[in-house]
Image (cartoon, rainbow, N blue to C red):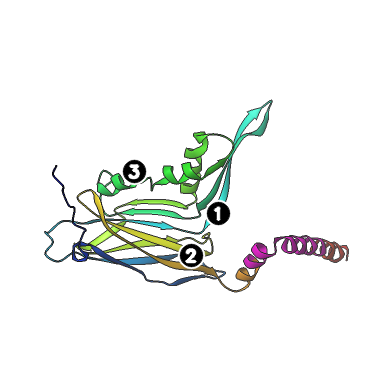
Amino acid sequence: MMLVLAMPARAEDAVGVVLTSSEAVVLMHPNFSGEVVTLFGAIDPPRNAPASPYSVLVIVQGPRADWVVREKTRQLGLVLNSAAVQYEQVPSYFGIFSSGPRDGDEFGILAQRELGYEGLVGTSRIWRGGPQLDSEFIRLMERDGRFVQRVGGTTMHSPTAFSVRVRIASSAFNGTYIARALVIAGGEVVGETTTHFRVRTQGLERFMEQAARDNSALYGLATIILALVTGWLGGVLFKR
């Protein structure tokens, strides 16, 4: 019998990678129309490593929320809901940025690890209906700029330096956005790391958003009272 002893990988053989954000906090004000956050990355190859080209896949995920997709059909001249599917805890923003082409190693890793749209949506579907609405959900999220896929969106400035530009829309959710960088060589992930930045509303909008989230019942009641008072006041003024 012959025994083969596998030696553990040495620390000096690991590929290091660093990722940082140009903005720690993105503040959304009343006239906010969007902002670009730039992620900067650097790859630290192991000592005495052979010259091997690296490719980089960056995935950015925003705060999670529940979503419902309803299918409408025409019945007896009326447009009615015929099916509904709920997707639980899906990122409000999901961006995929590759340094190579669509047929490159990055998208092979994406499919292998089920890191793309289909894997995300398929595992979050929890309520009624089958996968027939998954593609429609993805289409709607892409239309609203919440699902973003950029082939060549990761720019390689040198064999070991890269950057990604992430656009934060005015409809972005408040919360933490997590960016994950995967360094790929020879069709395998050889290094990865994460960083994060926050999106936060400031001023009156932030107060309203916090009130709606933390005290939804009181917020709804206050909204109804305000609408009634506004309607009554408008009626009094126009009578004069």
Q: Is residue 203 left or right of residue 24?
A: right
- Residue 127 falls in image quadrant: top right
26, above or below 55, in the image: below
**Which numbered disc covers residue 65?**
1
Instruction: Give percent across and percent down for residue 140.
Output: 50, 45
State the residue at coordinates (55%, 54%): 65
23, above or below 13, in the image: below
In the rendered image, the quadrant that contains the C terminus is: bottom right
Q: Which type of secondary structure does the marked residue at label 3 adopt?
A: helix
Q: Say if the magenta span includes residue 220.
A: yes
Q: Which type of secondary structure does the marked residue at label 1 adopt?
A: strand
Sequence-earlier tag: 3 or 2: 3
Q: Residues within 10 Å of mark 3 (few under 14, many from 20)?
A: few
Span colored in magenta: 209-229
Q: Nearer the viewer, residue 82 or 181?
A: 181
Determine the residue located farthest toward the front in the rendered image. Answer: 1
Q: Residues within 10 Å of mark 2 (few under 14, many from 20)?
A: some
Q: Which type of secondary structure does the marked residue at label 2 adopt?
A: strand
State the residue at coordinates (82%, 64%): 229
State the residue at coordinates (59%, 37%): 128
Instruction: Identify residue type, mark 2.
Output: Thr
Q: CA distance from mark 2 to mark 1?
A: 13 Å
Q: CA distance from mark 1 to mark 3?
A: 24 Å
Instruction: Give percent across and percent down for residue 99.
Output: 27, 54
Query: Are the residues flagged by discs 2 and 1 in contact, CB closer than 8 Å?
Result: no
User: Mark 3 — residue?
Assistant: 111
48, above or below 130, in the image: below
User: Mark 2 — residue?
Assistant: 176
